[in-house]
Image (cartoon, coloured by chain):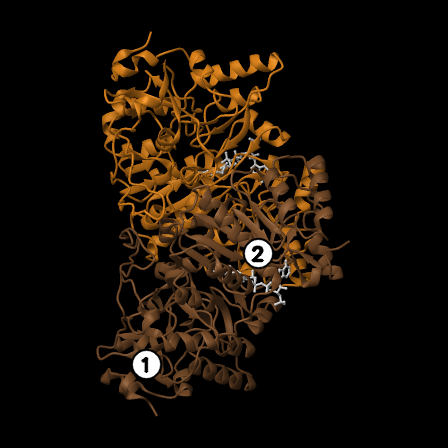
Chain colours: A orange, B brown
Amino acid sequence: MPEFDRIQCTALHSKIMTAEQAAELIPEGANVGMSGFTGSGSPNAVPQALANRIEKLYEQGKSFKIDLWTGASTAPEIDGALAKVNGIHTRLPYQSDPIGRKRINEGSMQYIDMHLSHVAQYVWFGFFGKLDVAVIEVAGILPDGSLIPSTSVGNNKTWLDQADLVILEVNEYAPLALAGMHDIYYGTQLPPHRVPIPLTKTSDRIGEQYLRCDPNKVIAIVPTNKSDRNSAFKAPDDSSKRIAGHLIEFFKHEVKLGRLPKDLLPLQSGVGNIANAVLAGLNDGPFENLTSFTEVLQDGMLAMLRSGKLANASCTALSLSPEGEHEFMKNIDFYRDKVVLRPQEISNHPELIRRLGVIAMNAMIEADIYGNVNSTHVNGSAIMNGIGGSGDFARNAYLSIFMANSIAKNGDVSCIVPSVSHVDHTEHDVQIIVTDQGLADLRGLSPKERARSIIANCVHPDYKPLLQDYYERALFQSVGKHTPTILSEALSWHDRAQRTGSMKP
Amino acid sequence: MPEFDRIQCTALHSKIMTAEQAAELIPEGANVGMSGFTGSGSPNAVPQALANRIEKLYEQGKSFKIDLWTGASTAPEIDGALAKVNGIHTRLPYQSDPIGRKRINEGSMQYIDMHLSHVAQYVWFGFFGKLDVAVIEVAGILPDGSLIPSTSVGNNKTWLDQADLVILEVNEYAPLALAGMHDIYYGTQLPPHRVPIPLTKTSDRIGEQYLRCDPNKVIAIVPTNKSDRNSAFKAPDDSSKRIAGHLIEFFKHEVKLGRLPKDLLPLQSGVGNIANAVLAGLNDGPFENLTSFTEVLQDGMLAMLRSGKLANASCTALSLSPEGEHEFMKNIDFYRDKVVLRPQEISNHPELIRRLGVIAMNAMIEADIYGNVNSTHVNGSAIMNGIGGSGDFARNAYLSIFMANSIAKNGDVSCIVPSVSHVDHTEHDVQIIVTDQGLADLRGLSPKERARSIIANCVHPDYKPLLQDYYERALFQSVGKHTPTILSEALSWHDRAQRTGSMKP
Ligand SMILES: CC(C)(COP(=O)(O)OP(=O)(O)OC[C@H]1O[C@@H](n2cnc3c(N)ncnc32)[C@H](O)[C@@H]1OP(=O)(O)O)[C@@H](O)C(=O)NCCC(=O)NCCS
Ligand SMILES: CC(C)(COP(=O)(O)OP(=O)(O)OC[C@H]1O[C@@H](n2cnc3c(N)ncnc32)[C@H](O)[C@@H]1OP(=O)(O)O)[C@@H](O)C(=O)NCCC(=O)NCCS
């Protein structure tokens, strides 16, 4: 039964239908822009119904694929379901679904891994072709057709503006009390008509509460009732706690030297175990009145908002555990005051990240002794997730920090290597590297000085003598002594890991 | 004889001295910020005198080094002279001097290669320690101590603000008629106090004509009379002309498809043979009313300003051949109207490059089949010049274009390789690759699709079958088929070139 309270635009009542009916309206080969950023705010009924439709077509010997564009990663009902039936030709801009990853790495799905801040504008520029259909989850539809966004904003504004056809999932589970938390900026333009974005503080509101939507483009409305599918909160492990400890010490040191204000600067933080540990560390730490300018509001930030350590947070999506969600919804009036949900072209905008002087803290797969960082590939060829917003933040940050455990795969892999097997953040964009072993401050260091600092501070004892040996031989043998490199050995650790399962000789 | 007309601040007359006397005032181990961006606007007498002083000290068995910070590359009187006497401990942020390069690659000089837009702010943040001395060339000193800049602005504003001590070279050769061409923006702040930079058109003036300078910090004034040492203009070779041809065709195509306005968007262009050919091609091409937002005003742009093809140009330095300089100075009133010289933190600012929607065209050393670009290193270890502003522009551009001849070293080297030996611009930041062979448009392509396009369009016939063979074997053998890679072969072309002098098997 459709819930008419949520669909106040009566002209659209005739468009209410089932997910199966809506899925039939998506043409083969279409470019489809779906909502969703992490598990938050993604449609589920229509993509699931589309996957069922595709599966049936395949059983009849017919092929059916779409190109899928989203905010970032999504729930298994989108990425997992559509990848399982091999229904995606090209995926962009970010994914982290195990089935999708398998498709990409077996070569049956094309993936365009890109900076999240580039997505909306490239679509506006026409670089990816026409967006045919938008499938957007919302919390409600107002009388004039404008939309109350749900738990993420992502690229929804762009999808709604750019798509020929719009399908809406109206999710009854999304609290209407979310209204007022969103800030949808409609001041973007195409060059040469762009103007400064008038945001100077993380808490600034510069836009509108609702998403504009032309009701004439709406071809289907599907009522749903589902909670976001975010994973449970894991308590930080020891290694992550050590990383957090090194970072907090470093921040204290920087404040003491006058290189950071007492209340630091706006924090950006990736998701995951290490990020949670850092947030927990900050919540127990000496800094007050912190702010956040980041992609995702996670459990750790709720605790900090509650404790008052964090004054406010700007993001593009909520990514809360079931318990976090419960807490958030229970005290939504408290949080509405302190949280702003923005389009990802704003949450990740280079102009704003640089202006605000964000402290960027992102996890990585590996770094090399010269400070190049790999966020995306295992052994140079297999994608893990994607670069996401890490480049938007790292390049424009006041401080660009990358974090990892010093080893992975039970010690078979060192996360510090002679040369990374894929570069996502170059030596020019990485200032601080932290592992459980310690922190290397690379600011003002030449490549050779960086190598010495990284080897001394960040490498696991199992790999330290090996890396030291490589570096010393490189220093001796290398033709150029700016970035000493033994070309025949640079990727040999990865090659060995691939062949034998371990980087150890 | 000091020329008192140029030094109108009478309080400073007592500081007039010889270059030798001024050089004596620079302490050992000092961080020294010098003016200069390409051969333009760099001091020469004081650094030359300092080099002589250092040489004498070395003869006496004493060591003396400074850390040298500049705008970008400089004249041989700075980089060459000081590197020759081994007088530089650490150099940043860019260099292109043969002697300096040799020092770096033999390991006797530390070099920090960084984005030009990051330099000023990192100094303000205190990340490189205190700036002790600024040595700045100016065209004149006004009664209140403020300075008429000469032919480049670079980081001069920051050096003057940040240094404890200031040494000025007043260059009588720099025409006073330059006054009014500069636009020194004093609105920058440290986070969290930054505000939008109020520039929306390449021709906007948002700052002041003169450099502020506290006369109390001035410890020496050295009158000089010298022309900038920029190299002669070379007529474009055939290969460069072909690259330019491919690009102009591409621009026409983009305008036809409505993806670029008729008058394109502000152009950024590196220096050198290819850049000159592109400018010459544009001057003969169908586009009118062009604008430029770039680092350096070069001969090719003078021709375009004269012909009216180019409406105006924003840059941080003039980099003209002797004939170009002559033309420029002769018609300086015409050019003053059309040229704005800005600090490099503004000419290269991500906020502005993105807002204006710049078309970035930069030369590269090599690209790989997946679209990663190396701008800085030969065979992974030896520095060529540095990244300069190429990353500032490429990352934030409307279109990010990289250009090279398909081969180098008389064909012994392919500029398209299986994997680049150093990454300066990642696959996420490169949209168009052009060689004399053709143009690969990588927008909207997955890594495998990019590889096919680059191999089809950009590779020299001598290397095409080899690269095709590598790619096909990689596609078959690679564990991950997202970015097919044979780890043991990825750098083998460079290894072979290093061992045998040629990439050919
Ligand atoms: C880099 C990234 C994959 C790390 O993820 P994480 O969850 O923090 O860290 P984990 O240690 O759990 O590692 C995740 C997986 O990578 C593997 N891994 C980590 N380092 C590895 C290495 N050097 N080599 C091979 N595999 C490695 C882990 O074993 C684990 O695999 P598993 O799931 O099969 O066990 C993740 O942060 C990411 O995708 N980053 C890119 C996007 C980004 O930075 N977004 C942030 C917000 S803008
Ligand atoms: C990349 C760069 C070195 C190319 O320089 P260029 O003058 O346009 O091109 P050239 O073809 O003359 O190459 C310069 C040198 O590199 C060598 N070279 C070019 N490609 C090479 C390759 N793939 N392998 C080895 N050497 C190569 C050339 O042989 C030449 O060497 P030589 O002087 O000993 O003969 C130069 O553009 C640069 O330093 N770029 C980085 C900074 C930047 O992009 N600034 C732009 C403005 S922001």
| Residue at the extreme top of the image, as rendered | A1
User: SS class of the residue under badge 2?
Assistant: helix
Towards the viewer: A112 or A365: A112
**Label 1 vs 2, first from the N-terminus:** 1
Residue A234 seen: yes
Is disc 2 on the same chain as disc 1? yes
Q: Give the residue at x 29% y 62%.
A: B185
User: SS class of the residue under badge 1?
Assistant: strand
* Residue position marked by numbered label 2 in the rendering: B243
> Does residue B111 appear left or right of residue B495 in this picture?
left
Residue type at mark 2: give it. Ile
Of tags 1 and 2, the one toward the viewer is: 2
For the residues labelled 1 and 2, the Cα–Cα distance comes to 50 Å
Crowd rating for badge 2 (residues with CA inside 10 Å; few <14, some 14–19, many 20+)? many
User: Is B329 located above or below residue A179 in the figure?
Assistant: below
Quarter containing the C terminus of chain A:
top right
- Residue B495, x across and y down, in percent: 71, 55
Q: Which mark is residue B219?
A: 1
- Residue B80, x across and y down, in percent: 53, 76
| Residue at the extreme right of the image, as rendered | B505
Q: Give the residue at x 51% y 17%.
A: A51
Q: Chain of mark 1?
A: B
